[in-house]
Image (spheres, rainbow, N blue to C red):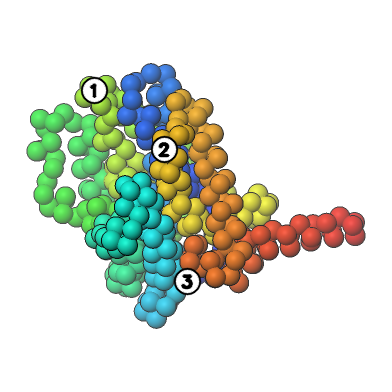
Amino acid sequence: MNTSKKHIYFFDFLRIFAAFGVVYMHTAAGILRESVNFDWELINVLTSLAFTAVPLFFMMSGYLLLSSERTKDISVLLKKRLPRLIVPLAAWTVVAVLLNCYRLGQLNISGIASGLLSALSEPAAVHFWFLYTLIAMYALSPLLYGAINSLDKKGHIYVLSIIALVTLQVMLTAVLPESMHKAVNIDVIAKLKFFGGNLCSFILGYYLGHCEKRLPNKILLPAAVILLAVIAFGTHSLTVRNGEFTDTFLNQSAGFEVLLASCIFLLFKQNLNRPSRLTELFPAVNLLMGIYLMHNLLISLFASKIRAYNCFDTIWLTAANFAICYLAVKTAASIKPLCYIVNGISFEDACASCNWQYTFKRIREARNERIHT
């Protein structure tokens, strides 16, 4: 099925939800490593929800790539898709290296060159790992597309069974005592965790997106709430028992978080797959690449001056961070030489969807409509 030209409306909402989740979990990371109290418990619940962001992003990418016939075209991959990831990653890597050198007092040619060289083997900023992994998945996407779309019914069941085994192993490892881990940490299953297990989410997105059977909200919502409660309670219990923050239940590549992300994916798909005035008025979707790459650099830049002390702080700092990044990358998208470098989208696409030129055009159109009515 070719969905490359069909706009998937619920992805707009899902992307914004996931983007806020990523910003929140990095904002709350510090306070979760402090003592457990009432604010910690609230932040723990919100973080348990926010950690679905990464599997959701992989699921959406997997659905789009594995559903589009253009994925077979290597020229599309090399000329369009990969550059849209590599160029902004490279640009923001330079920014991250400069910030790192500044903090370390090594802002010189030698320090910068060393930082850029190191970025070839490991991300210059911790959150860049996602782009490194996504680029590798994109590179293999023609092979994955051919494999998935050539399977018959039994083949699809087989693939889903492998994903289920990987997910089950992670869940059992989380809930069972350490003395029983050897019974469930089967090496063969562990070796199926390609790309750290994130390939499962990538492929699962294809199946969730093509699932034609509608699951009632009265099943999905309670399932999501129960999974969220299990993750939050499990994280609380392990943290209290170990005397330090333990994120076993927050595994983003498999296990409870992926199941929760699947429920959220289906809830958005079944209830929000329609045009919305909100996403038209707040055109952030095409800017999320830049926001993602920038947000954690902003957190690290002001870490010594601004930090969260309670649940309210984590929320308003998340909102403020998102807003600052949005305004910054939107402005960059309004400057032709910077647009593609910062956001990975063409200036023409930005003018038609998200930059200041687009916003001012919409304001003028709305004003003209009011005048004529």
The quadrant in which the N terminus is found is bottom left
Near-viewer residue (49 or 218): 49
Which amino acid type corresponds to the residue marked 2 in the rendered image?
A: Ala
The quadrant in which the C terminus is found is bottom right
Q: Is any atom of residue 81 visible in this view?
A: yes
- Locate residue 293: give its quadrant: bottom left
Residues at badges 1 and 2 in contact (C-beta under 8 Å)?
Answer: no
> In what element is the residue under mark 1?
loop
Percent x, y of residue 208: 41, 54
Q: Which residue is mark 3?
A: 2
Is residue 79 left or right of 348 when viewed as pictured? left
Circle 3 residues within 10 Å: few <14, some 14–19, many ≥20 = few
Who's the residue at 50% across and 62% down the image?
A: 343
Which amino acid type corresponds to the residue marked 3 in the rendered image?
A: Asn
Q: Which residue is mark 1?
A: 243
Q: CA distance from mark 1 to mark 2?
A: 24 Å
> In what element is the residue under mark 3?
loop
Percent x, y of residue 315: 51, 33
Is residue 51 left or right of 344 when viewed as pictured? left
Q: Which residue is mark 2?
A: 303
Nearer to us of marks 3 and 2 is 2
Q: CA distance from mark 3 to mark 2?
A: 45 Å
